[in-house]
Every structure is written in structure tokens, then in C-alpha cells.
Amino acid sequence: MSQGKTLSTAELHYNKMTGTPVSKLILRLGMPTTVSMLITSIYNMADTYFVGTLGESAQAATGILFALQSIIQGIAFMLGHGSGSLLAKSLAKKDTQEASTYVSTAFFTGGAVGLVITTLGLLLLTPLVRLLGSTETIVPYARDYGMWILLACPFMICSLILNNNLRFEGKAFYAMFGLTTGGLLNIFGDYLLVKVVGLGVYGAGMATAVSQVVSFTILLIMYRNKAQGSIRLSYISKKFRDYLDIMRVGLPSLIRQGLTAISGSLLNNLTKPFGDVAIAAMSVVNRYSMFVMCVGLGIGQGFQPVAAFNYEAGRKDRVRKGLLFTMSFSAVFMALMCLVTMFYAEGIVTLFQKLPKVVEIGARAMRYAAVGLLFMPLSIPVNMLYQSIRKAGIASVLSTLRSGAILIPVLLIGVPILGLQGIQLAQPLSDCITGLISIPFILHFLRKDR
């Protein structure tokens, strides 16, 4: 690409990010991300649905491996959000070479880390699934599913790095196309391999792995053809400071996902005494809650590149408008979904598992979860805000709350006192407290950071 063309592209991008009305820009960037997250969530629920036809122990295995997927995603988001935010800063300065350095460094680092996780995970697969909360009846299913998750790990990490850097470049549609194609393929693969061929949990895991490889391939092609930055071995940074900067900015994402994995494993282990039916029920509730959160998260991720770019460009007024719009849009959607969940909780759980005891446990937990989700528009956007403007300390503190600093004590205190109800209440209570704690951080930015 010629220097003239590079400058022209950079100028057009700058004008779009600083001149388009904030709400319109967030929706333009956020809706494709929301669609891709919804498809991802749907194929996770498809795993839960198709595997649920094999029994509660098989279904519980997908919930057990959710913690492992959270760890993998945490590493990917740390590298993707970290490099993406720094890439946005570079593009705000119209420095495409620096942007290429950040994305190339994150991409190849993520691939190397993924290979290490795959190797160690396969060597230690049985103790790993036990550590994550598998009972003896769940272990065989968890091994079958977990093997494929681990094999797909390098592709999963690199896909999410590419996805996030495309988003921060303002190319959310292309990011959506890669993840959505893989997600739809996964749903078809679940039907084919689980229902038609009869491979059970093994087939569900295989469908997930194949879909990750396809998504990775599409996203790599998209990035090479559509992005301003370039991915090349020659662009890998030789400066230790660049690695530290990527990890520092992306650390809140790792904390958030890492604590999700730890608390998820703790939740599974505390649920063991109540049987496989309880683990299966909570697996359904967690997958459904993630589905509902996708719109709020998707719009928030549309806000991230807007916040990162405009903060660097000195347009803090646009960042404040973007935060208020994101919170308001997410709050309306969450309120509507809360009403639907309250009225139809039993029917929603029955879609995935018809065993009466699973429906009973899951429906009550789902109604509690709906109340907690009402507080997510307070906590998620402000966390994304501070991470995007590279205030990693505040973002890291906020990231510890929902899935760690609050949830873990609530579980450890609530379950011995309330039993199964303590498990059902733990995450919603954590969501409520996290939302309330987030309010001062929102007000601080709106009032002080001018």
C-alpha cells in the first residue's frame, strides 16, 4: 500500500470515529458484535440442548468445561483488548506501523500460549476435569468434550485477538462475519454429530473445535484484506515494554475471565453434594444468562473502540455521551428480558432439560438471575470504559468484583447457610452489589474527567 493511500485511509477513519454521531457510531459498531456474540451464545446453548438429550450427567459436562473456556477466553481477551486499545491509540495518531506491531505481537504470542495450554491440558486432562468440579459420572463426558476444547485452544485465542482488533479498527462487520459463520457451523455440527451420527458429547466437542478453526481462517483472511494494520512475523515487537503495555491494558479482561473460571469451578464443586441434576440446572442457567447479557455486552463492545479512539483524540465529551447511551440502551433491553424470564422460566429450562428436578432447580435460579441482570448495565459499560481509556488500575478493580471479590465470599458464606438456595442466589447477589459499587466510578468519570 502506498503512503498516500495509507494516509487517506487513516484520515477517513479519523473523521468517522470523531465525526459520526456517538449513538449512531456505537450502534454501527456494536450491532455486528452483538450478532456475533448472540450466535456464539446460541451455539453454546446448542451444545447444552443437544447434549441434554443424552442425560443430566452429559449436560453437566458442558457446564464443567465452561470454566476452562473462560480461562482460554481470558487470555485471548487480555491480548485482544490490550492490543486493540493500543492499536486504536496508534490509529488516532495515524501511525499504521505501530498499530501493526501491536496486533502482530498479540497474535503470535496468543498462538504460542495456546499451544502450551493444549499440550499441558491434554497431558493432565483427567485431573483437570476433576479439579473443575466433575463427579465420577461426569468425568468420561468431560474428558470427551474437554479434549476437543483443548485442541481448538490456539485457534480460539487467535480468533478472538483478530476479532477484537478488527472491532477496534472500526471493522465490526468483518469481525461479526468470521465468528457468526463459525457459530452457525457449530450449530449444524451439533445436530449432525450428536443427533444424526450419534457421537454424543464427543461429537459436540468436535463440532466446537471445527467451528473455531473455520472462524480463525475467515477472520485471518478478513484482517489481511480489510484492516489498516498488518500481521507479519517481522512486526513482532522486540521491546519488552510493548508486551507489558498489551498485558497491562488487557489485564482487566484476564482478571474478569480468570475469576469467572475460578468461581465457576468453585460453584461446581459446591454443587456436587446436590447431585448431577443441580450441576446440569446451573449449567442451563449460566448459558441462558450469558445469552441475555450478549446484547448489553455487544453494545458495550461497540462503545469500546469509540471510547478508546475519542479519548486519545481529546474528544472526552463524545466518550461521556457514549457511556450514557450504552448504559441506557442496555438497561432497556435487560428490563425487557427480565420480564420474559420471570414469566417463562420453567419453559426456558424445559427447552434444554425436561427432567422435573432440573426444571425445578433451574427455574428458581433463573428468576434470581434475572434480577441480577438488571444491574449489569451499571457495571459492564463502566468497566469497559476504564479499560478502553487505558486506566487499567480502576478497570482491574472493577473486574475483580462480579466474578471474584464478591461472588466467591458470597458462595463460601451462603452455601453452608442456605444450601442449594445459596448457590442459586450467589451470582445474582454478586451482580446487584457490583452494580451498586460501580455507580461512584460512573459519576467520577462523568463529573471529573473533562
Image (cartoon, rainbow, N blue to C red):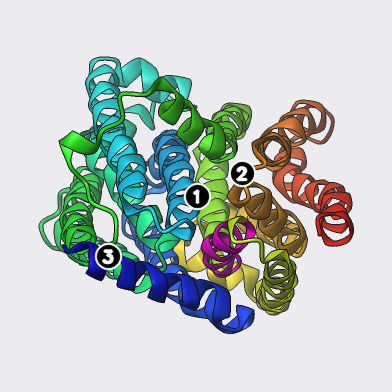
Viewer-nearest of discs 2 and 3: 3
- How far across and how far down the image is residue 161, in percent? 35, 47
Say which of 124 and 112 sits in front.
Answer: 112
**Label 3 crowd bin: few (<14), some (14–19), many (20+), radius 10 Å:** some
Q: Is residue 23 left or right of residue 81?
A: right
- How far across and how far down the image is residue 164, in percent? 40, 54
Residue annotated with mark 2 = 390
> Type of residue at label 1?
Ser
Quarter of the rendering containing residue 312: bottom right
Residue annotated with mark 1 = 85
Q: Which residues are magenta?
A: 295-311
Residue annotated with mark 3 = 6
Asked if disc 1 and disc 2 are in contact, CB closer than 8 Å, the reply is: yes
Viewer-nearest of discs 3 and 1: 3
How far apart are the two marked residues, 3 and 1, measured between alpha carbons? 20 Å
Q: Residue at x 49, y 56 (%)?
A: 355
303 magenta-colored: yes
Circle 1 — which element?
helix
> On the rendered image, what quadrant is the C terminus found in?
bottom right
Dominant SS in magenta: helix
**Label 1 crowd bin: few (<14), some (14–19), many (20+), radius 10 Å:** many
Q: Using the image, determine if residue 194 lies above or below residue 394.
A: below
- How far across and how far down the image is residue 379, in percent? 73, 54
> Type of residue at label 2?
Arg
> On the rendered image, what quadrant is the N terminus found in?
bottom left
How far apart are the two marked residues, 1 and 2, measured between alpha carbons? 8 Å
Q: Is residue 434 left or right of residue 13?
A: right
Q: Residue at x 75, y 50 (%)?
A: 431
Q: Residue furthest front?
A: 4
> Type of residue at label 3?
Thr
Say which of 148 and 403 sits in front.
Answer: 403
Q: Is residue 246 left or right of residue 205?
A: right
